[in-house]
Image (cartoon, helix red, strand yellow):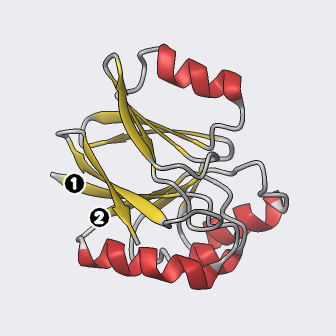
């Protein structure tokens, strides 16, 4: 079993991200997915304890700087869309601001899990055979939240911070 921590919409706020990092530590997360609107290298650095996959969001304007920070931290940069496989489960990782790409990820049946951000609203729902997970947001959300995904069972939980 692999426990995945999912986070989104940190918007460069390293101090607001710290409680999420502590929560991931306490829940024995093994991998982290960041669903975009990362915002700063300071946020990237907080995930050094885990292999972390990052996609960019609509507010990630300094693309080259963020890509460099992610790569320098030894993490995985996916640009606008990540196609991952963890514990035999295929996961789409995106921000969801590109509505066409988001709907394709959901409707295509190619991914068992679609992990996304952008809305700042936490949600876990099934669409047919696809599990949709939005961890909520670290910035401009009340409450702040993250998600935990247990694989290969595909069981997801929203955790308020």
Residue found farthest to the bottom? 15
- Apparent side of residue 95 relative to residue 29 in the rendered image (left or right): right
Pointer 2 residue: 30
Residue found farthest to the front? 142
Pointer 1 residue: 2
Could you tell me which secondary element the residue under label 2 belongs to?
loop
Q: 96 and 81: which one is in front?
A: 96
* Rendering coords of residue 41 (x, y %): 69, 76
Q: Is residue 159 above or below residue 111?
A: below
Q: Is residue 52 above or below residue 104?
A: below
- Determine the residue positioned at 42% across, 61% down: 146
- Apparent side of residue 140 relative to residue 149 in the rendered image (left or right): right
Image quadrant where residue 125 sits:
top left
* Rendering coords of residue 64 (x, y %): 81, 61
Q: 149 and 84: which one is in front?
A: 149
User: Which of the two labelled residues, at mark 2 and mark 1, occupies the earlier sequence position?
Assistant: 1
- Determine the residue positioned at 25% across, 57% down: 3
- Apparent side of residue 84 relative to residue 3 in the rendered image (left or right): right
Image quadrant where residue 91 sits:
top left
- Determine the residue positioned at 68% across, 46% down: 79
Quadrant housing the C terminus: bottom left
- Determine the residue positioned at 78% across, 55% down: 59
Mark 2: few/some/many CA within 10 Å (<14, 14-19, 20+): some
Asked whether the beta carbons under mark 2 and mark 1 sit within 8 Å of each other, the answer is yes
Q: Which mark is residue 127?
A: none
* Rendering coords of residue 57 (x, y %): 70, 50
Q: CA distance from mark 2 to mark 1?
A: 7 Å
Q: Is residue 137 above or below residue 161?
A: above
């Amino acid at each position: 079993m692999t426990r995945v921590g999912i986070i989104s919409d940190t918007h460069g706020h390293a101090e607001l991200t710290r409680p999420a990092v502590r929560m991931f530590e306490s829940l024995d997360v093994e991998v982290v997915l960041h669903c975009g609107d990362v915002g700063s290298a300071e946020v990237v650095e907080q995930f050094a304890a885990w292999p972390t996959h990052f996609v960019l969001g609509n507010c990630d304007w300094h693309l080259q700087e963020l890509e460099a920070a992610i790569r320098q931290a030894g993490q995985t940069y996916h640009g606008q869309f990540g196609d991952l496989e963890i514990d035999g489960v295929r996961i789409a990782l995106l921000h969801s601001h590109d509505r066409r790409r988001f709907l394709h990820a959901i409707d295509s049946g190619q991914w068992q899990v679609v992990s996304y951000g952008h809305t700042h609203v936490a949600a876990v729902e099934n669409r047919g055979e696809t599990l949709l997970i939005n961890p909520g947001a670290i910035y401009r959300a009340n409450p702040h939240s993250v998600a935990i995904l247990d694989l290969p069972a595909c069981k997801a939980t929203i955790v308020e911070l």
